Image: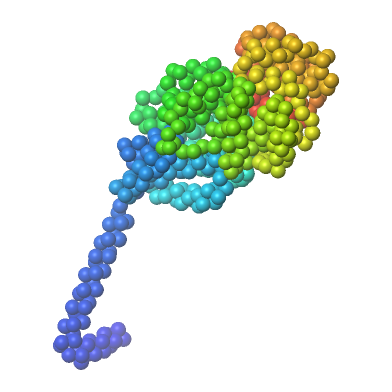
Amino acid sequence: MFIRQGLKVWFGIWLLGPELINKLYFISMRILFLLGILLSVNVGVAARQKVYDFNPKCRQAYEAIMALRLDQGVALLEEEKKQHPDNLMPYFLENYADFFTLFFNEDPALYAQKKWQRADRLARMEQGPSNSPYYLFTQAAIRFQWGMIRVKFSERWDAVWEIRKAYQQLKDNQKKFPNFLPNNMLAGAMQTVFGTIPEGYRWISNTLGMKGGIRQGMQQVQQVIDSNDETARIFKWEACYYYCYLKLFIENKPEDVWGFIQKYQMDTKNNYLFALMVANIAMNNQKATLGIKVLTERNDSAQYEEIYYVYYLMGNLKLCRQDEDANVYLQKFVERFKGKFYLKEALQRLSWYYYLHNNMDMANKYRKMIETKGNTETDADKQALKDAKSGRWPHPLMLKARLLSDGGYFTEALKLLQTKKAADFALMEEKLEYAYRLGRIYDEMGQDDNALTMYEVTVRTGANRPEYFAARASLQMGYIYEKRNDKEKARKCYQTCLDMKGHDYKNSLDQRAKAGIQRLNGG
């Protein structure tokens, strides 16, 4: 049958004549020639391997992005894409630029515009060689950053799964490439934080396979900072950034943080990210003057990204120092910031500014806005809303003393409080705060015995009340006893803090108390 069909075809071609046969021959040869070219191109494309090349241009871009010179960094990445189209590193580093703008500024329109790039970048990273340590590391870092972004946009469950997947990929990468130290930077930071999850929520971390330990986690991050390994040196400053926050908020060693910053000469003038970090640490560590100095002296040229969070920081720091222009910065934050985190707190601080300046029209205006603006994801924002709904204003002397104390102006705050005694205040919460504020001031001034006396009064009086004063006093007592190496008393104080229910700032205080117990247990 096949022979018969073949004869028919050849007989038909013979009938066409020799000229037409020649034309068909040349046409077929041309088609084969074109097919050959296409096949060679396709084979060439398939043979070109994607790579993770952290070359000098990528390093330069990374350094610019980590200093928040985002336009400069992205421009360098675009050049790298054109020069080396098979290099995946520019797409990985682009994620850093998007992370900083989305995390700090929380613009929902920009989030909607950028959100699709997460999946695109992960897919690109999967095109690289799986035998490279960057294969899993880049994917984990992208997931980690998007987990942090999702938190800011109230996608909490998605954020948890992003972090879980990132952690698992890092642990797998550590097994495959134990000498690839960038793994330790992120895995160590996550492990440190997981170690402070309160007991009531441990089932979540256990279910998700996220186990923590403060000591081991901090050692991993420190290893990246101290290593002379070439790859580790690339990520040194990013590791320093994580380390400072962990040292302060998890290990509660503020003096070590300042020593670390000085030892490594972290450039707060030309690195905007470091300036924001140091100012934030200063705000949370009673060093308002230092925070203001850092933000004032930083290089604020147009090459740096505009980060609205800086107005929140400067406004808070200046309010603690009682500067007349504190409201200017807080108003800039409220007007320009498009996100929801810290917005209620910023409005509360604005209302306090005008309250202390006896301008009740403006004070009430901003207090009213607290009920409709922002969200209550943070304890500070929850507290701002609760205070606004209460309809009560704080005692002006107590508020002024609180702000001065928060800024590190302890002598001035103590002088204010010493003009009064507990009996001078009408409300129980004011009497309680009076004892607590005195305790905190004595604590910060190094008068530990006086501090313990006032803290004990606060705990005894306010343990069953909704204000946070008793829980925070118990936490601070734990810090003092831990410093004295009296582990039994310190553990008891931390546990007392954890046992108190229904008070303000419950989540953040519980995390700190949990971290204290972990440290005492050598975890």
The residue at the point 20 percent across, 90 percent down is 16
Vertical placement of residue 507 versus 264, above or below: below
The colouring scheme, among rainbow, by chain, secondary structure or one colour, is rainbow
Q: Quadrant of the C terminus?
A: top right
- Residue 368: give x, y in percent of width and height: 73, 39
Does residue 273 appear to the left or right of 9 in the view shown? right
Vertical placement of residue 502 versus 431, above or below: below
Decide if residue 299 is in sight here. Answer: yes
Q: Quadrant of residue 76?
A: top left
The residue at the point 66 percent across, 30 percent down is 349
Does residue 489 appear to the left or right of 233 in the view shown? right
Closer-to-camera residue (291/45): 291
Closer-to-camera residue (90/98): 98
Tally the marks. 0
Decide if residue 385 is in sight here. Answer: no
Closer-to-camera residue (322/157): 322
- Residue 378: give x, y in percent of width and height: 66, 35
Q: Quadrant of the N terminus?
A: bottom left
- Residue 433: give x, y in percent of width and height: 75, 20
- Residue 424: give x, y in percent of width and height: 82, 15
Q: Quadrant of residue 410?
A: top right
Vertical placement of residue 10 versus 330, above or below: below
Q: Quadrant of residue 398?
A: top right
Vertical placement of residue 107 versus 463, above or below: below
The residue at the point 43 percent across, 40 percent down is 70
The residue at the point 66 percent across, 32 percent down is 350
